[in-house]
Image (tube, rainbow, N blue to C red):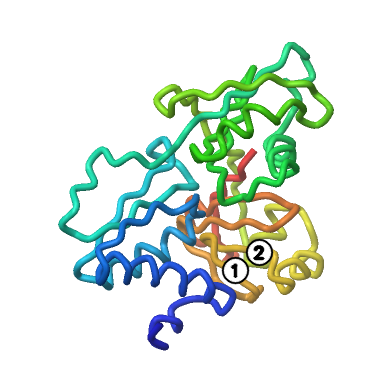
């Protein structure tokens, strides 16, 4: 790996950068195809950056629907036609006759699946619907989950494997917040969104538990801009929808979308 590529990424991302560059080089030099596990948006960005640096390689990305957050990548030499390439996606449909299913959350389903020894990289987006959950999984673990996932947070469940075409997607809901802030600093806006003091919000940020656009951000003074996605472990996610005009008192008008 050339040092100049490392300079574009966070030090904690070097292992993935090395792995992704190996996929790209193998496709370009040895004509090897590669179907990855699920990538988060930051990993996808890193891979896209590296693919774009190689003139003889291209890739397609598929997470089951156009707005998917987690996707699998199919990397190949540029002469390969990747139209319609099978990316090995299946839908794990989870239902139950127990009404307690209706109160289960994303973390309940995730925890139960990971509790079976499944790696996070084998799981795509999880859509908690009104009366069921549709989880996108890689084909190679779908049968195992169908056979072994019988309970989610003490609720007995039934599972079915469906083709990806039968995926039902949960509509993203945002709580709209309109704030004014003295600056666009990460800690200032985050403290207002989560209704915490600035001294408390800087703790998870400095501890590396904050991501801006899926990249670790440890600097509380880092400025935010329109479109930035901020997640703080244990507190949830929000998106900066718009930074408007200044108030008469010189404060920024900020429109936030907080994920429900």
Residue 186, x across and y down, in percent = 62, 67
Residue on which the image places disc 2: 210
- On-image quarter of the C terminus: top right
Q: Which residue is drawn at 72% across and 74% down?
A: 206
Residue 110, x across and y down, in percent = 68, 40
Q: Residue at x 62, y 75 (%)?
A: 221
Considering depth in this image, is 78 or 11 the residue closer to the camera?
Answer: 78
Query: Tag on residue 216?
Result: 1
Residue 174, x across and y down, in percent = 57, 38
Q: Distance between the residues labelled 2 and 1?
A: 6 Å
- Under circle 2, the secondary element is strand
- On-image quarter of the N terminus: bottom left
Q: Which residue is drawn at 64% across and 76% down?
A: 219
The residue at the far left in this view is 79
Query: Would you place residue 3 above or below residue 90 in this image?
Result: below
Q: Earlier in the sequence, mark 2 or mark 1?
A: 2
- Under circle 1, the secondary element is strand
């Amino acid at each position: 790996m050339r040092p100049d590529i490392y300079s574009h990424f966070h030090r904690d991302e070097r292992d993935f950068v090395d792995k992704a560059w190996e996929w790209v080089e193998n496709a370009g030099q040895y004509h090897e195809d590669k179907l990855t596990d699920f990538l988060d948006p930051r990993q996808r960005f890193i891979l896209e950056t590296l693919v774009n640096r190689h003139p003889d390689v291209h890739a397609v990305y598929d997470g089951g629907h156009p707005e998917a957050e987690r996707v699998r990548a199919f990397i190949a030499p540029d002469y390969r036609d990747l139209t319609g390439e099978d990316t090995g996606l299946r839908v794990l449909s989870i239902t139950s006759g127990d009404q307690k299913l209706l109160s289960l959350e994303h973390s309940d389903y995730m925890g139960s699946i990971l509790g079976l020894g499944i790696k996070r990289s084998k799981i795509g987006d999880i859509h908690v619907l009104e009366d069921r959950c549709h989880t996108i999984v890689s084909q190679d673990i779908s049968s195992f989950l169908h056979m072994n996932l019988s309970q989610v947070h003490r609720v007995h469940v039934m599972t079915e494997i469906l083709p990806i075409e039968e995926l039902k997607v949960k509509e993203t809901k945002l709580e709209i917040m309109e704030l004014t802030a003295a600056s666009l600093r990460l800690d200032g806006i985050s403290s207002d969104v989560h209704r915490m003091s600035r001294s408390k919000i800087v703790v998870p940020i400095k501890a590396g538990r904050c991501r801006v656009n899926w990249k670790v951000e440890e600097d509380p003074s880092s400025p935010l801009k329109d479109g930035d996605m901020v997640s703080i472990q244990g507190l949830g996610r929000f998106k900066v929808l718009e930074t408007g005009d200044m108030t008469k008192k010189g404060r920024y008008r900020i429109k936030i979308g907080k994920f429900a």
